Image: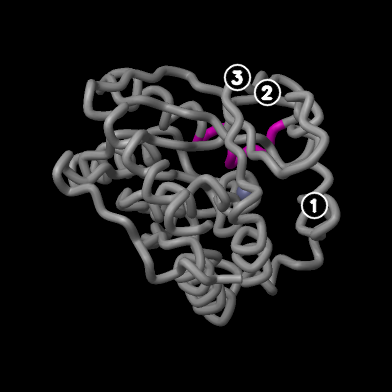
Amino acid sequence: MTKAMNTHLHFNNFGQRTVLTIYAHADDEVLPAAGTLSLMSKAGWNVRCLILTDGSLSSSSVKGTRHQEADAAGKIIGANYEFYALEECNFSTQAVIKVTEEAIEHWHPDLIITHAPQPEKYGHRDHEVCAIAVSNVATRKNIPLWYSAPPVFLRGFEPNFFVDITSVIEEKIAAIGCYESEANKAFMQLDAILVLSRFWARELGQKDGYFEAFEISRQWVDASFFSAIANSNKIEYGFFS
Ligand SMILES: [Zn+2]
């Protein structure tokens, strides 16, 4: 299930790309994007996952558990995690803007992925604040920005970019499985994740396979992007077949 865990393919000839994900809570990132992040890390991207809250207000054991679970998930999908200790259900847009600006300063991301902004009555409060603040900074700094699918209630989410994650679906399942402390949430149940992945496949007219869906808020690529894709395909076919 983790056959390619340690086989990162680097394309340093083009300069290593960095994707920065910014989510409110640990586990928010694996549900909609673990497959895509895993594919990116295999293609040589530096995958940085920033989590705004660490459960530190619940209890110290929760905090430690969240960190351990995220690190375990990160080993599977090839991502490095960084936690901030903002207060759940109480952090401000300003606080997230500050965190986002610091992270950009530090990592110089080529792409940012975050929560999809949703109409207020459907989105989790923390997800909304995160989405708005990150969008503000990414737009201001002209950094490509993708929104990932909300875990429940897709209202307001209009995907226009789909990633075939069939080759890494087992890694996604394993990464989700790392978050045992969240496993009792209804939407964490495996069948729900698989159903949604198949739903996106059907949206695309595919009978088989698993997909993740994104809404591209803004995107640009330079010429080397196409070389990287061409080379990664070549290597990946040789590697997996
Ligand atoms: Zn969340």
Residue located beneath label 1 in the image? 187
Left or right, 33 with respect to 82, comes to right
Residue 46: x %, y % from top left: 30, 52
Which residue is drawn at the image coordinates 21% and 40% (left, top)?
A: 108
Going from the N terminus, do you reach mark 2 or mark 1 first? 2
Q: CA distance from mark 3 to mark 1?
A: 23 Å
- Residue visible at 44% across and 33% down in the picture: 93
Front residue of 179/129: it is 179
Q: Residues within 10 Å of mark 1 (few under 14, many from 20)?
A: some
- Secondary structure state at the residue bearing disc 1: helix
**SS class, disc 3:** loop
* Nearer to the camera, 234 or 210: 234
State the residue at coordinates (52%, 45%): 36
Label 2 sits on what residue type?
Phe
Q: Dividing the image into 4 quarters, which one contains the N terminus? A: bottom right
Q: Number of marks in the image?
A: 3
Residue 222 falls in image quadrant: top left
In the image, residue 87 lies at what x, y percent?
A: 50, 54
Q: Which residue is mark 3?
A: 160
Q: Amino acid at mark 1?
A: Phe
Vertical relation: 239 (above or below) 106: below
> Per the image, is 126 magenta?
yes
Does residue 217 appear in the picture of this structure? yes
Q: What span is in magenta?
A: 123-130
Which residue was labeled with disc 2?
A: 157
